[in-house]
Amino acid sequence: MGLDMQFFKRLLTKSESAGGWLAISFLPGELCLAHVRRMPGSRPVVGLCAIEPISAFTDPDALMKFAKNMRMGQYRCLTLLNLGEYQVLPVEVLNVPADELKTAVRWKIKDLLDYHIDDAAIDVLRIPTDKGVSPNHGMYAIATRNEVIQRYVTLFEEANIPLSVIDIPEMAQRNIALLLEEPGRGLALLSFDEEGGLLTITCDTELYLSRHIEAPLPQLLQEDTEQRQRYLDRIVMELQRSFDYFGRQFHDIELTKLMVAPLPLSIGLEGYLARNLQMEVEMVDLHQLFDFSKASLLQQDQLTRCFLTLGAALRLEEKAL
């Protein structure tokens, strides 16, 4: 599986002297950095995992100075789009030649966008057809405005950061799911940030389904237990709907486990989901998945905020469609 999007391709000449990827994510009020190197036969090594306040980078010169101090020029750098900056749209299988696929997809989704299709950057993510997939759900179209991509490109260029790739959270989360999967079985992985929840279902390295859940992390952390309970109930309902849909669409994939990204224990989400879902629920232990011995120790809430950035830094070398 590969994403051959205009904004996913390599944008600038890069140096590979450091190995791995340096992911740079823009969170609300924060800049998150993670450098990860994949190691054959052992856990991926985290060379850097840090959070910096955005207030320190009020202009490109400040970001450029920071990038120089961090020696970002030696890394392959990537960044993540935020929720609201892109759309993931299911598309039925189109019987067209490979070199005509993106044109056909653009025509197919043009009425689903709230902006003109000529202003969109589009890519296609195929879903494997050997797992009982419904013929009406064979691929995803990923769309974003060209101006969004240009904004990131300009920001990194002005800061003299060698940006190679712009990715999406679904693929970052897929990368972490690969470390958790059992061969031949589906894996559901759920994470939360300030923008809401992200559910992905993968099997044998492939992304089959993704859903956004309107349950922002700050709402799950609030002291108002009644309001928090409403969000917990919403999460359970959305998960049940997603799992039912997945079972109908991908009936050959057995889905038996839900993994939840690190969250403060005070939320009680793991136990609540285990009591209300008919499947095993387990919290992800990032220290079992990654080797953090070369990185500064982060607190649990920081690891929660860096979850998708770590996943982005696990990026595989994708093959073009």
Image (tube, rainbow, N blue to C red):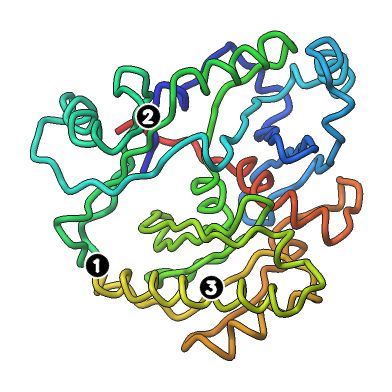
Residue 38's place in the image compared with 206, above or below, is: above
Element marked by disc 3: helix
Instruction: Choose mark 1 or mark 2, whichever is in front.
Output: 1
How many residues crowd mark 3 within 10 Å: few (<14), some (14–19), many (20+)?
some
Residue 107's place in the image compared with 59, above or below, is: below
Report the residue at 81% width, 18% height from top.
63
Report the residue at 59% width, 86% height from top.
274
Q: Amino acid at mark 3?
A: Arg
Q: Is residue 85 left or right of residue 124?
A: right
Please name the residue that numbered disc 3 is placed on. Answer: 234
How many residues crowd mark 2 within 10 Å: few (<14), some (14–19), many (20+)?
some
Report the residue at 71% width, 16% height from top.
161
Report the residue at 61% width, 42% height from top.
312
Q: Earlier in the sequence, mark 3 or mark 2?
A: 2
- The Cα atoms of the two marked residues, 1 and 3, are separated by 22 Å
How many residues crowd mark 1 within 10 Å: few (<14), some (14–19), many (20+)?
many
- The spot of residue 31 in percent (x, y) is 78, 35
Please name the residue that numbered disc 2 is placed on. Answer: 4
Q: Nearer the viewer, residue 225 or 292?
A: 225
Q: Does the CB distance between marks 3 and 2 fall below 8 Å?
A: no
Q: Amino acid at mark 2?
A: Asp
Please name the residue that numbered disc 1 is placed on. Answer: 249
Q: Earlier in the sequence, mark 1 or mark 3?
A: 3
- The Cα atoms of the two marked residues, 1 and 2, are separated by 25 Å
- The spot of residue 291 in percent (x, y) is 77, 55
